[in-house]
């Protein structure tokens, strides 16, 4: 069973979010990295780019697939995890430490629409069957 | 899953879904005179009866002999070079004789190793980090490079490309046809009438934001562009640099990786000069190389070297997440094939010639062109159009109409050059002449004498 920290918020498309004030840190879940397999490349957005909730904003490429990452919330990218360029595999070892980017939220109320850990765990479990 | 052809019912329901009455209606766009009526009593009446092999051989030999064996001084994108007999002897061995990268590629280790060697040679010639396993031809390789630049240049996000008029006119047309429907525009960049190259001074006032600058090397006129200044200008303005090269010339000239402070970002071009016969215009192959940072935007197949479970070297198609069978509509590579057979010949050709051999061919071609231009411009009424150094082609201007001169020469079995009248009317009666290492002094003299005679008798 994959790791789903209780303090984070989740999307159906397997992104996690941790919020500090109006800045959200975004990554992909342990379940997602497990499905994708060994990461070989992560394409991150440019700082300053604006996204609406649900826009594709990054790509994670593993040995067996390349998948879009969708912005869980609307806002503007304020920081990206530059370390991933040299060590994409850190997403496999700890997908909650290896965040992808931080986004300054334009609508904090969107957070209420996200899933909590319990709900996401259910989805991830269904997915695995 | 078994292969099951469409049933009548499948066909009917598909036609219904798109609102068409019959399969024939799908071909409405084809003029009636060219169409066969599939429901007619003899549906393929317009197709001639079959011929026995002996008749076909006779027909084709007859047609081939109509070409004669003229003395050819036309280059303009397809170049006559000596190809050692071993090249096609080896290329046509059963183990190699296939047009494509094979399906179930990893089962054909020999083919993959050859493509890997090809990529290594191309990367060495251009100085780039990566090469793909080839594209269709020079013109479409430029179109792919333009698409790649627009995807890759995240700084500028521009869909405009600076396209000099010194790029092969056919390449410009092909590129435009391929990229225009994606909203990409090619902004023309004019050349200096005295030098035949892009005058860097004409660039300083260029307004706007460009995804890339295309630099031909040598350019269509054979002239060498000021690659260092152009490359630095492009990078200073946030544009990527696409080099369109003659790979043979790189045996002698500065590799694109060394242009300016940072080098070109992508290199494309026509591979034909490396062991592929002119063959009335094809098949040729396109080459494509780039810096490591851009590799995920690169189209085409890439072969990588790896080790198997026992630690033995093996070859595999790699970076396939770019490709359409994995990324679907977001693929950066929508070309899953390459010119396998041409690349096989080219790789064997380069292996036989070596770096030194390629350099000697390039140097001899250049020397012959110098001699040719000297002999031709000694004729009263013939002059050089430009005053800058050129590789193995050069533009000369005639004081007689181009068509008349070229047909008189052709009557004497000499293909005197490529007419520039249509694409570059501002140059007047201008032709592009080429001399490769295949020409000797007698050939050059023969051309000069015939041309002299034409001018004397007029």
Image (cartoon, rainbow, N blue to C red):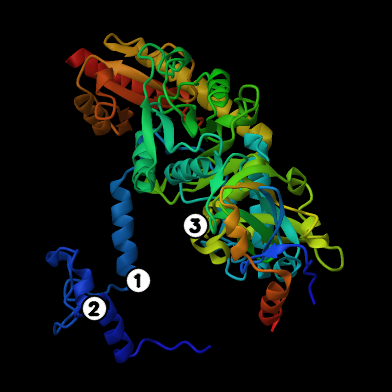
Identity of the residue drawn at 29% across and 55% down: B62
Residue B437, placed above or below residue B63: above
Total of numbered circles in the picture? 3
Disc 1 vs disc 2: Cβ atoms closer than 8 Å? no
Task: Classify B193 as above or below B54.
Answer: above
C-alpha span from label 3 to label 2: 28 Å
- The label nearer to you, 1 versus 2, is 2
Horizontal and vertical percent position of residue A70:
59, 58
Q: Quadrant of the C terminus of chain B?
A: top left
Name the secondary structure under disc 2: helix
Q: Secondary structure at mark 3?
A: loop
Q: Is residue B275 visible?
A: no
Label number found at residue A89: none
Question: Which of the 4 quarters of the picture holds residue B357?
Answer: top right
**Residue with the mark numbered 2:** B23
**Residue underneath mark 3:** B334
The first of marks 1 and 3 along the sequence is: 1
Return the x and y of residue A23 as percentages of the image width and height.
67, 47
| Residue toward you, B236 or B429 | B236
Q: Circle 1 marks a residue in which chain?
A: B
Tags 1 and 3 on a common chain: yes
Label 1 sits on residue = B53
**Pointer 1 with pointer 3, Cβ within 8 A:** no
- Helix, strand or loop status at disc 1: helix
| Residue A111 visible (yes or no) | yes
């Amino acid at each position: 069973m994959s790791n789903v920290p209780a303090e984070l918020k989740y999307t159906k498309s397997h992104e996690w979010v941790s919020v500090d004030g109006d800045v959200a840190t975004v990554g992909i879940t342990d379940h997602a990295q497990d499905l994708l397999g060994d990461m070989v490349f992560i394409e991150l957005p440019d700082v300053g780019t604006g996204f609406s909730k649900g826009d594709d904003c990054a790509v994670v490429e593993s040995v067996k697939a390349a998948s879009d990452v969708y912005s869980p919330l609307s806002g503007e990218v304020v920081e990206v995890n530059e370390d991933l360029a040299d060590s994409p595999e850190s997403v496999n070892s700890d997908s909650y430490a290896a965040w992808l980017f931080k986004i300054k939220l334009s609508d904090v109320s969107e957070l209420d629409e996200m899933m909590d850990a319990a709900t996401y765990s259910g989805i991830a479990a269904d997915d695995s069957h | 899953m078994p292969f099951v052809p469409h049933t009548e019912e499948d066909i009917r329901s598909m036609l219904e879904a798109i609102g068409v009455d019959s399969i024939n209606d799908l071909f409405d766009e084809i003029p009636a005179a060219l169409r066969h009526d599939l429901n007619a009593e003899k549906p393929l009446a317009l197709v001639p009866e079959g011929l026995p092999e002996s008749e076909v051989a006779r027909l084709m030999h007859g047609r081939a002999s109509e070409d004669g064996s003229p003395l050819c001084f036309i280059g303009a994108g397809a170049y006559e070079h000596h190809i050692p007999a071993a090249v096609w002897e080896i290329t046509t061995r059963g183990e190699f004789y296939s047009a494509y990268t094979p399906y179930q590629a990893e089962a054909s280790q020999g083919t993959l190793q050859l493509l890997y060697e090809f990529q290594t040679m191309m990367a060495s010639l251009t100085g780039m980090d990566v090469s793909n396993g080839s594209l269709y031809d020079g013109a479409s390789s430029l179109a792919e490079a333009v698409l790649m630049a627009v995807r890759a240049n995240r700084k500028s996000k521009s869909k405009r490309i600076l396209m000099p008029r010194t790029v092969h006119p056919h390449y410009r047309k092909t590129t435009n046809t391929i990229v225009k429907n994606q909203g990409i525009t090619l902004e023309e960049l004019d050349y200096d009438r005295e030098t035949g190259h892009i005058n860097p001074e004409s660039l300083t006032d260029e307004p706007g934001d460009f995804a890339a600058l295309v630099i031909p090397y040598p350019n269509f006129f054979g002239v060498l562009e000021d690659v260092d200044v152009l490359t630095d200008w492009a990078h200073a303005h946030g544009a990527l640099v696409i080099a369109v090269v003659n790979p043979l010339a790189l045996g002698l000239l500065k590799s694109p990786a060394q242009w300016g402070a940072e080098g070109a970002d992508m290199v494309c071009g026509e591979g034909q000069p490396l062991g592929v016969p002119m063959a009335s215009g094809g098949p040729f192959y396109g080459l494509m190389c780039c810096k490591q940072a851009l590799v995920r935007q690169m189209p085409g197949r890439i072969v990588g070297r790896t080790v198997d479970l026992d630690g033995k070297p093996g070859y595999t198609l790699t970076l396939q997440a770019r490709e359409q069978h994995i990324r679907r509509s977001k693929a950066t590579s929508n070309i899953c094939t390459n010119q396998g057979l041409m690349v096989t010949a080219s790789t064997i050709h380069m292996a036989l010639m070596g770096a030194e051999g390629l350099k000697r061919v390039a140097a001899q071609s250049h020397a012959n062109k110098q001699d040719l231009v000297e002999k031709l411009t000694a004729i009263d009424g013939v002059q050089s159009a430009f005053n800058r150094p050129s590789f193995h082609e050069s533009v000369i201007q005639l004081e007689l109409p181009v068509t008349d001169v070229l047909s008189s020469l052709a009557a004497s079995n000499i293909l005197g050059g490529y007419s520039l009248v249509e694409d570059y009317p501002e140059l007047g009666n201008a032709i592009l002449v080429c001399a490769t290492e295949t020409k000797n002094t007698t050939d050059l003299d023969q051309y000069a004498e015939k041309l002299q005679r034409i001018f004397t008798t007029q």
